[in-house]
Image (cartoon, helix red, strand yellow):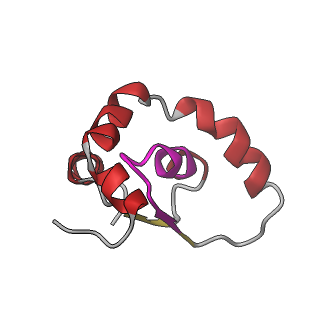
Amino acid sequence: MSYKTEQENFWSSEFGDNYIDRNQNYIVNIPFFSKVISRTFGVKSVIEFGCNVGLNLMALNNLLPRCELTGVEINSKAANELSKWGGAM
């Protein structure tokens, strides 16, 4: 696939594939998002662009189980892993 920017090419390439292996644990994101959520009210949906395999979305799902989550990912390997999780559109 041909992308418009150098960054799109970068993240859709092997570097993006390898990023999946280096980042596997969503639990470490929970304290950060817990702090963020404590300063919000009534969050019903979240969309993340460049979500990789969805670690941020998984942390948010843990904290906001009724929230509608959507992830957009350019790297096909990461997008496939995200769809296997099934917790985000």
Residue drawn 80% across the image and 54% down it: 38
Res. 6 image quadrant: bottom left
| Residue 54 forms part of the magenta stretch | yes
Place of residue 51 in the rendered image (x, y in percent of width and height, measured from the top left):
44, 54
Res. 74 image quadrant: bottom left
Left-right relation of 13 to 88: left
Left-right relation of 31 to 73: right
Residue drawn 33% across the image and 66% down it: 89
| Residue 21 forms part of the magenta stretch | no
Q: Nearer the viewer, residue 49 or 63?
A: 49
Q: Quick check: 49 above or below 87?
A: below
Q: Nearer the viewer, residue 89 or 73?
A: 73
Q: Quadrant of the N terminus?
A: bottom left
The reply to whether residue 80 is in sight is yes
Q: Quick check: 88 above or below 19?
A: below
Place of residue 26 in the rendered image (x, y in percent of width and height, measured from the top left):
50, 35
Part of the protein shown in magenta: 47-60
Left-right relation of 84 to 16: left
